[in-house]
Amino acid sequence: MQAEQIIKRPLMLTEKGTKLRDAENKYLFEVDRRANKIEIKNAVETLFSVTVIGVNTLIIRGRHRRMGRGHGLTKSWKKAIVELASGETIDLFEEG
């Protein structure tokens, strides 16, 4: 898989993500379900030119949602928490 296919989008709008970014230098991404930790690490390093120390992943299950009178299930997706070396940042997440 290409690096652009592995990293789908950054997750920046949550309070937990902001705290992790400010306190622990960790960044959140939505990634492809088939990608493993090594592929995610290599993709972040090539796309953003940073040094990755560690990667944690978790799968977010789809939730039941009402749609009018019916109901459905949202899609399951994979989240990656990427820890960078001290002093390095990703400009995409900087506010201002």
Image: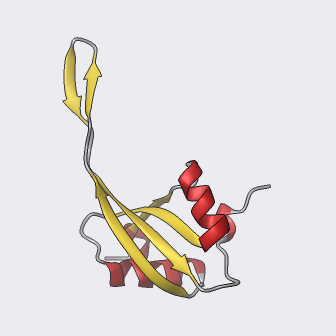
**The C terminus appears in which quarter of the rendering?**
bottom right
Q: Is residue 64 above or below residue 22?
A: above
- Kindly identify the residue that appears in the image at 59 percent across and 84 percent down: 50
Residue 54 to residue 68: above or below: below
Q: Is residue 3 left or right of residue 83?
A: left
Towards the viewer: 90 or 53: 53
Q: Residue at x 54, y 54 (%)?
A: 16
Q: Front-most of 1 and 22? A: 22
Q: Position of residue 35 (x, y in %)?
A: 29, 73
* Residue 36 coordinates in the image, percent (x, y): 29, 77
Residue 56 place in picture, x, y as percent: 38, 73
Closer to the camera in the image, 32 or 18:
18
In-image side of 4 versus 72 (left or right):
right
Q: Nearer the viewer, residue 4 or 42?
A: 42
Judged from this view, the residue extending furthest toward the top is 69
Label count reads 0
Say if 4 sits above or below 41 in the image: above
Q: Quadrant of the N terminus?
A: bottom left
Q: Residue 23 falls in which quadrant of the image?
A: bottom right
Residue 2 in percent (x, y) is at 37, 76
